[in-house]
């Protein structure tokens, strides 16, 4: 669809034309899928739904006076929306993991900083529930959590130590976090 037709469809959709809105959504669905794929570690279906919401909002906010093509405006809005959504997901997990830790044993789950050195080499000192969760992770996923969370390494430092790319280490971490998120969700 040419930019002129796209702008025309956008203006129709803004004024309440459902067919125009559906046509725009259908036209930009591949872009939504592509962007949602980048967030599949957080759940592809949820990411796709968020991209769809962002697309609907972008249609309602777009004005030809903005000075950029609709497709560019839409992509920027969807990327921004998905980044914000991803941050909310991480905060949610952080809150629930902390709440779970305090709920399942208070002091037993919270170790003094001096004792972290022992834990970094032996996950068995963690509460039983956490040890079970960590056992469900692959050795690489355990490694990245241990190195980054307990020892404070950056992803780049871990990558250099393991002779892999930073992206590979990031993938290990994403898989580990996804597994932990699903365990937290199961517990609720």
Image (cartoon, grey):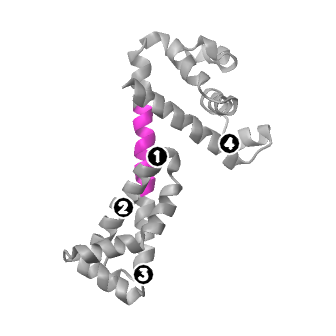
Camera-side residue of 5 and 164: 5
Distance from disc 2 to disc 3, alpha carbons, whole Å, reads 19 Å
Distance from disc 2 to disc 4, alpha carbons, whole Å, reads 30 Å
Mark 3 or mark 4: whose residue is earlier in sequence: 3
Q: Residues within 10 Å of mark 4 (few under 14, many from 20)?
A: many
Mark 2 or mark 1: whose residue is earlier in sequence: 1
Q: Give the range drawn in magenta.
A: 82-95
Q: Where is residue 64 in the image (x, y as percent from the top left)?
A: 33, 83
Dominant SS of magenta comes to: helix
Mark 1 or mark 3: whose residue is earlier in sequence: 1
Mark 1 or mark 4: whose residue is earlier in sequence: 1
Residue at (26%, 81%) from the top-left corner?
11
Give yes or no for contact between labels 2 and 4 (Cβ–Cβ under 8 Å). no
The residue where tag 1 is placed is: 43
The residue where tag 4 is placed is: 169
Distance from disc 3 to disc 4, alpha carbons, whole Å, reads 37 Å
Give yes or no for contact between labels 2 and 3 (Cβ–Cβ under 8 Å). no
Name the element at disc 3: loop
Residue at far left of view: 16
Q: Where is residue 38 in the image (x, y as percent from the top left)?
A: 53, 55
């Amino acid at each position: 669809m040419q930019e002129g037709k796209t702008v025309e469809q956008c203006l129709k959709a803004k004024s309440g034309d459902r067919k125009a809105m559906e046509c725009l959504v259908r036209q930009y669905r591949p872009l939504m899928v592509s962007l949602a794929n980048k967030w599949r570690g957080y759940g592809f279906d949820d990411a796709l739904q968020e991209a769809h919401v962002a697309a609907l909002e972008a249609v309602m906010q777009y004005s030809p006076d903005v000075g950029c093509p609709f497709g560019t405006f839409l992509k920027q809005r969807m990327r921004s929306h998905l980044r914000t959504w991803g941050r909310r997901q991480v905060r949610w997990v952080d809150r629930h993991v902390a709440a779970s830790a305090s709920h399942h044993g208070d002091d037993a789950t919270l170790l003094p900083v001096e004792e972290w050195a022992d834990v970094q080499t032996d996950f068995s000192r963690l509460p039983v529930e956490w040890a079970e969760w960590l056992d469900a992770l692959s050795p690489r996923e355990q490694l990245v959590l241990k190195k980054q969370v307990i020892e404070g390494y950056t992803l780049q430092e871990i990558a250099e130590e393991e002779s892999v790319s930073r992206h590979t280490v990031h993938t290990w971490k994403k898989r580990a976090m996804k597994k932990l998120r699903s365990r937290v969700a199961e517990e609720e």
